[in-house]
Image (tube, rainbow, N blue to C red):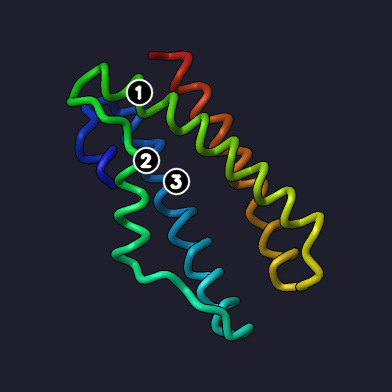
Amino acid sequence: RLAHQKSESKEVKDYTIVVINDRTTANQHLAKIAKQLDLPVAPREEVVEKAKALMPQVMDGETFDEAYAASQVKTTQEAIEQLEQTAQTTDVPQIKAFAEETLPKLQNHLQMARALQASR
């Protein structure tokens, strides 16, 4: 959301809308799974603070867009690796199904982030 506000690029704004929508849906789905399995969920404020710490520490304009695109490639690759590992190792059907459902969306995000990075 912060990147959507800071960027002046239509490409970046379009990317952030897709990612925000997909991740909001995924987070809601994960919250339901956690509730079903009686698992703890970190408070929203804690998650927001961790996300802010991952944002590129640059100001505005093209420099921000470049740093943001690069960070999205890196963090999305890491998320894909984690989710693939979880899908392969979990014995919890709901978690496995979530991973298998979410991976294609993350792979799409990675493709979009790479295109953003290439266009910068």
Dot placed on the residue nearer the N-terminal end, 3 or 2: 3
Q: Secondary structure at mark 3?
A: helix
Element type at mark 1: helix
Q: Which residue, given by chain and number where applicable, does mark 2 sit on?
A: 54
Q: Please name the residue shown 67% across and 42% down the image.
A: 81
N-terminal label among 3 and 1: 3
Q: Position of residue 26 (x, y in %)?
A: 53, 61
* Total count of labels: 3
Left/right of residue 6 with respect to residue 30 in the rendered view: left
The answer to which image quadrant residue 24 occupies is: bottom left
Relative to 25, does residue 81 appear above or below in the rendering? above
Asked if 54 appears above or below 71 in the picture, the reply is: below
Q: Position of residue 85 (x, y in %)?
A: 74, 50
On the rendered structure, is 58 left or right of 29?
Answer: left
Residue at the image point whose x is 34% and y is 67% from the top: 44
Kindly identify the amino acid type of the residue bearing the numbered disc 2: Leu
Question: Could you say where residue 111 lies in the image, as x and y percent from the top left?
Answer: 58, 30
Q: Are there few (<14), some (14-19), or many (20+) residues within 10 Å of tag 2?
A: few
The residue to which callout 3 is attached is 19
Q: In whole angstroms, how far apart are the C-alphas of marks 3 and 1?
A: 17 Å
Q: Amino acid at mark 3?
A: Val
Tell me the CA gap for discs 3 and 2. 15 Å
Kindly indicate whether the residue at mark 1 contacts the one at mark 3 (C-beta within 8 angstroms): no
Task: Look at the picture and state if 70 lies above or below 51.
Answer: above
* Residue nearer the viewer, 3 or 40: 40
Q: Residue 96 lies in what quarter of the image?
A: bottom right
Query: Dots 3 and 2: beta carbons under 8 Å?
Result: no
- Quadrant (top left, top right, bottom left, bottom right) of the C terminus: top left
> In the shown orientation, is residue 3 left or right of residue 84?
left
Point 73% across, 65% down: residue:
97
Of callouts 1 and 2, the N-terminal one: 2
- Kind of residue indicated by mark 1: Ala
